[in-house]
Amino acid sequence: MAVKHINKRQQALKHLEAALRQFDRATSTLNFLTVTKAFEVLIEYEWRELKALVEDQGLDAPSPKMALKQAARLKLVTDLESWLDCIDARNNSVHDYFGISEQEYVELARKLVQLARARNSTA
């Protein structure tokens, strides 16, 4: 796995953390949109890195959800349900089928930060 990819994932994590801080300082539509975009970027880097790790172990991971399920099997992630919730939220936001409130989305973004930090500490 390239160092450049890891650095981009870490940078995406920092961007989401900064977006959440900005949202906390001033709740606005623009700040919420910043959170959603930073969330999408981080979850994209996370699942693609997990896909590469899973495939390096000889397992098939053709989709984000399968990559996460295989990563959980390999104990590369904990709290599979939260990871899957993040993928669902990313899919829904990208396709504009928001099924959760703004506050629920922000809380899920906070959860993604925790999940990503946990992966950083075990990597």
Image: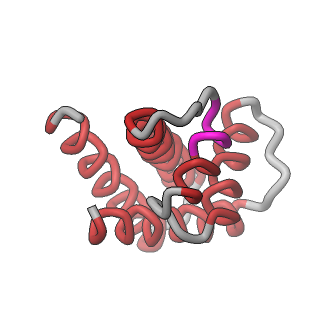
Q: Nearer the viewer, residue 10 or 101?
A: 10
Residue 27 lies, in percent from the top left, at: 54, 66
Q: Is residue 8 magenta?
A: no
Residue 84 lies, in percent from the top left, at: 68, 54
Q: Quadrant of residue 9?
A: top left
Residue for point 59% across, 48% down: 70
Residue for point 64% across, 51% down: 69
Q: Residue furthest left?
A: 3
Q: Nearer the viewer, residue 55 or 4?
A: 55
Residue 45 lies, in percent from the top left, at: 41, 39
Q: Quadrant of residue 94?
A: top right
Asked if 72 appears above or below 5 in the picture, the reply is below
Indicate the colouring scheme: secondary structure
Main secondary structure along the magenta-highlighted residues = helix
Asked if 20 appears above or below 56 in the picture, the reply is below
Q: Nearer the viewer, residue 84 or 113?
A: 84
Residue for point 34% across, 55% down: 13
Q: Is residue 66 magenta?
A: yes
Residue 110 lies, in percent from the top left, at: 51, 69
Residue for point 44% across, 44% down: 50
Q: Is residue 83 left or right of residue 44?
A: right
User: Which range is magenta?
Assistant: 63-67
Asked if 5 appears above or below 114 in the picture, the reply is above
Q: Quadrant of residue 5?
A: top left
Q: Is residue 3 left or right of residue 60?
A: left
Asked if 28 appears above or below 30 in the picture, the reply is below
